[in-house]
Amino acid sequence: MVAEEWSRADWLAHADTLLDAARRHASPGGGRIHFPGAEGGYGHDIDGLEGFARTLLLAGFRIAGERGVGVDDLISFVRRGVAAGVDPGAPDRWVRPDEHGQAKVEAASIALVLDLTRPWVWDAFDAVTQQRAIDWFAPVVGDDAYPRTNWVWFRIVVETFLRSVGGPWSAADIEADLACHDSFVREDGWLSDGEERSYDHYVGWALHVYPVLWSRMSGAAELAGGRTAGDVARLDRFLDDALALVGGDGSPLIQGRSLIYRFAAAAVFWVGVIAEVPSHSAGRLRHAAELIVRHFADRGAPDTEGVLTMGWHGEWRTLAQSYSGPGSPYWAVKGLLGVLLPADHPVWTTPTEPLPVETGDSLRAVASPGWIVSGTAADGIVRVINHGTDHSGLGVVSTDSPLYARIGYSTATAPLLDATAWLEPLEQSVTLTDADGRSTHRSGMRLLGARVDGGIGVASATWDAQWIAPAPTAHAHGSGFTGEARPAGRIRVDSLVRGGVEVRIVRTDGVAADAVQLRVGGWAVAGGRPVSRGSGAVAEASAHGLTSGIRSLTGGAADAVRRQDASPLGASAVVPVVELEPRGEAIVVLDLRGAGASVRTEAVVERDGDTVSITWPDGHRSRTRLPSA
């Protein structure tokens, strides 16, 4: 828990630091904001639109939160920028939604803010500027080229705004997009970002945030048709899990794409306050949001100039998508959504309540993504053991995305993301390797279940392991790559989890003749100079007080593999691995511990058919029946 909670004034000061930096980088006409840094993959014009639209969100929150009082300079800046952006003859006019798809994304932020700040911005425009804005938004109507993902909300928000100002809109568009959103609904308040098994921060900062904010737009209640109560109920249930996924140091789970949005992960907690969810106090939700925002503020984001770079803590361009530009990180400002709430809102005086990981060890199964979530109070680390998420679909053959398909993710470690990581799974993986050292992939795996049984988290999956020669591609951000596949055998992994320790049982079947070894990879730790050590079937790696350990209980040889410039958390990353015979069964114990934790990889494991008895490093004894295939 932070030593002293931020007051509302502290939140406003942090918001203003970001806004002041943005205004310094505005174009002469005010319609674009170009932050320093290399041009993004969509070009200079899109970069400028992104920079304006994404910081506009924060400006809108500030103006609305103050009810337009005392923020005259900010109001003038927004009016001037919007007027220039929609003026087709202005040198810094905005790229239109029918000129480039990315403008469809940014249009939603602009429409949302114009609605939020209607009395101070939209109503102050002359008729010419209002019509130009309507004309700029209008191409979204009837445009069926929107991806069937969280993007459906971009069209819903824009058309809702257009409807409220007398512009064109389509009831059929909104009805279809709401139905598409409903098709994403999964168990326990979770949503998948599209048809694939895509579970990440977009569940919170998009698929839960937009329904609530949309419901507050002018005229949205008529369009919602009574659906808002269901949206809020799903949000309320999702927050049960979301609160358990925040580390004791405020770090969000480092998993999924668009991680350069950083503290946008806090948005779902603020929207819970706005929606007045029944099961979670405003004090706990505010505290979760603050921990996340301050985690980054204390570690260089924003930088000393008040700018958000492309990276996690500091700048690390590899973390961004290939198309991202210098303004892309500013969707992070969604995490400052709370400044929308006025000074007299009760959230600012509600007593703080701690996160689950701050009160003791926690263990839960999350059914939809196929996760076991284990948080340990001693070191504040939250770990996820993943057997159901791969940004793919059951039986689909592709390479593994390191952002989605690894077996483990945590709030203290990051997946490796260099070019090799997309082709050769290493950390938190189980692979068969051939004589050339090529590793298999597991995307398309079949989840066998995730549950908590007698204080032990149990998750299992099986898959047809494939060596894949990927087809050339220019993008590496969500799904893995397709390509020519060569079967390597079938692998089943059962993960049994207690605290910071996982017992990983691996079984192979039908292994190809050219598979020369089975490799099990542990947690990657990163820093300036990580330390590693290995002996026999045991290896460890340490950096910044964090230790990753691996121990094989079925023979093999352990080692530590080092990769340079592969992690956003440090220049050098080290992964403990064990290499074993490729056929039969292997039992490997993995652990991840931070300063203050005493768990290690010593464990005694006995098998009796599908029943596993374990004496854990802390002396606890368990007896677990594994699921049938």
Image (cartoon, helix red, strand yellow):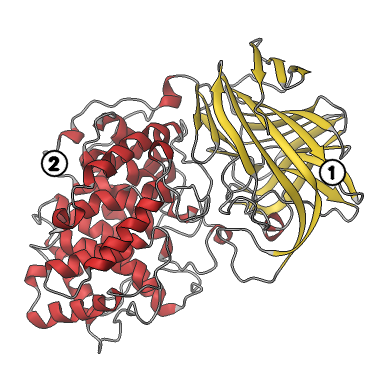
* Amino acid type shown at disc 1: Gly
In the rendered image, is residue 206 in sight?
Answer: no
Residue 388 shown left or right of residue 14 in the figure: right
Foreground pick, 111 / 338: 111
Q: Secondary structure at mark 2?
A: loop
Residue drawn at x 47%, y 75% as measured from the top left: 42
Residue drawn at x 19%, y 77% as measured from the top left: 134
Residue 410 shown left or right of residue 201 in the figure: right
Relative to 603, say whether 294 is above or below. Answer: below
Residue 196 locus on image (x, y percent): 52, 54
Q: Earlier in the sequence, mark 2 or mark 1?
A: 2
- Give the spatial CA distance, label 2 vs label 1: 65 Å
Residue 201 shown left or right of residue 514 in the figure: left
Residue 113 locus on image (x, y percent): 21, 61
Q: In which quadrant is the N terminus drawn? A: top left
Q: Which residue is mark 2?
A: 343
* Amino acid type shown at disc 2: Ala
Residue 510 is marked as 1
Residue 621 is marked as none
Residue 614 shown left or right of residue 509 in the figure: left
Q: Residues within 10 Å of mark 1 (few under 14, many from 20)?
A: few
- Could you tell me how many numbered marks the image carries? 2
Foreground pick, 626 / 325: 626
Q: Quadrant of residue 286?
A: top left
Depth check, mark 2 against mark 1: the one in front is 1
Q: In which quadrant is the C terminus drawn? A: top right
Relative to 620, say whether 179 is above or below. Answer: below
Residue drawn at x 38%, y 62% as measured from the top left: 151
In the rendered image, is residue 391 in sight?
Answer: yes
Foreground pick, 310 / 196: 196
Residue 325 locus on image (x, y percent): 46, 68
